[in-house]
Image (cartoon, grey):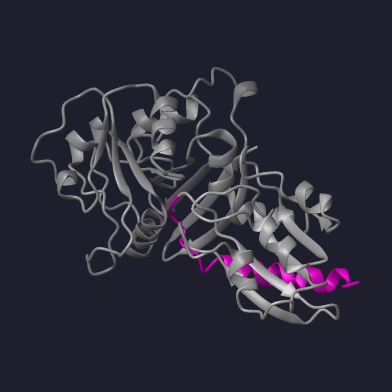
Amino acid sequence: MTDNATLEAGMRRALELAANGPATGPNPRVGCVILDGSGQVLAEGWHRGAGTPHAEVAALAQLPAGAARGATAIVTLEPCNHTGRTGPCVLALIHAGVARVVYAVADPGLESGGGGDRLRSHGIDVTGGLLAGEVESFLADWLVAARLGRPFVTLKWASSLDGRAAAADGTSRWITGPEARQDVHRRRSAADAILVGTGTVLADDPALTARDADGQLLPAQPVPVVIGTRVIPADAALRAHPQPPLIFATDDLLAVLQDLHRRGIRHAFIEGGPTLASAFVAAGLVDEYVVYLAPTLLGGGRLPLGDIGVAGITEQRRLTIEHYDRIGEDLLVVARPR
């Protein structure tokens, strides 16, 4: 039997492999490592995107027939149990004759879940939960989308050290330095969609693109999404975005998110002003806060958030800081609701 240290090393390698997959889109990033009875690696694989072989199948495809018999398959996500564009991974593992499957996180899908039980019914030893915390963090956006039927929502803002998002006259370019601004563009590129309100479009006319330090478009561009009932001008900059904009003339935020989920959007990045940001926070629809703090003072009342439904200190919305980093002269804080 392979020892725990070897299994953990295999899972961490599977997680490294999973990171090779596409960060955006409706499918999870999954990695797989197949070990022989002595703990040596026989094959590795990862999911390269919709319509391509899943990680387990990609790994098994590297082996001659019968080579996986009696082996251990280590997978970051519970093997799927349904037929989509590809067949169920559980059947591939069963037919390959693997003796043991170890996964980190259970598949929450109503159709795709249950792979572990199906494997057990065929006499395969199945263990779940290995390094679950690390893999949960890695798959956070996809897991939230799968569990809640809406995209994982990141809310970003930049503010001065005294918590102001703009000067008294409304100007905000630039509170943070170039390194922080480039980090924002990187995060935009890693999201499926970028959300703003009509107020931001009318006031700032943003392009909502993801660009490199030279202003060139990055290969991956988020879908621009505008929420609100005010009319967007025909010549608005976002209408020239590489992705056709989606405009929702409604204040029903959950309905918007559910619509985006049906379109295959799994990670939404909010860059709107305080009105939209506050509405998402008040509705309990923010899964991650990305806040850039600049070493400057602005004073005044231009806050990144307005009323979020907190009337007294006992109603405060407590967050857990995931990590913080120095980026140029600025401080980045990433936090999630408790």
Whether the magenta-drawn stretch holds residue 24 is answered as yes
Q: In the image, residue 109 lies at what x, y percent?
A: 61, 41
Residue at left 20%, top 50%?
Answer: 241
Q: Is residue 297 visible?
A: no
Magenta: main secondary structure equals: helix
Residue at left 76%, top 75%?
Answer: 35
Left or right side of 116 for 189: left
Residue lying at the far left of the rendered structure = 235
Q: Is residue 304 visible?
A: yes
Whether the magenta-drawn stretch holds residue 2 is answered as yes
Left or right side of 305 for 75: right
Residue in front for this viewpoint, 74 or 295:
74
Q: Which residues are magenta?
A: 1-25
Residue lying at the far right of the rendered structure = 1
Quarter of the image that includes the C terminus = top right
Q: Is residue 176 above or below residue 298?
A: below
Res. 304 image quadrant: top left
Residue at left 39%, top 49%?
Answer: 192
Residue in front for this viewpoint, 109 or 282:
109
Q: In the image, residue 41 lies at what x, y percent?
A: 73, 80
Q: Is residue 202 above or below residue 102?
A: above
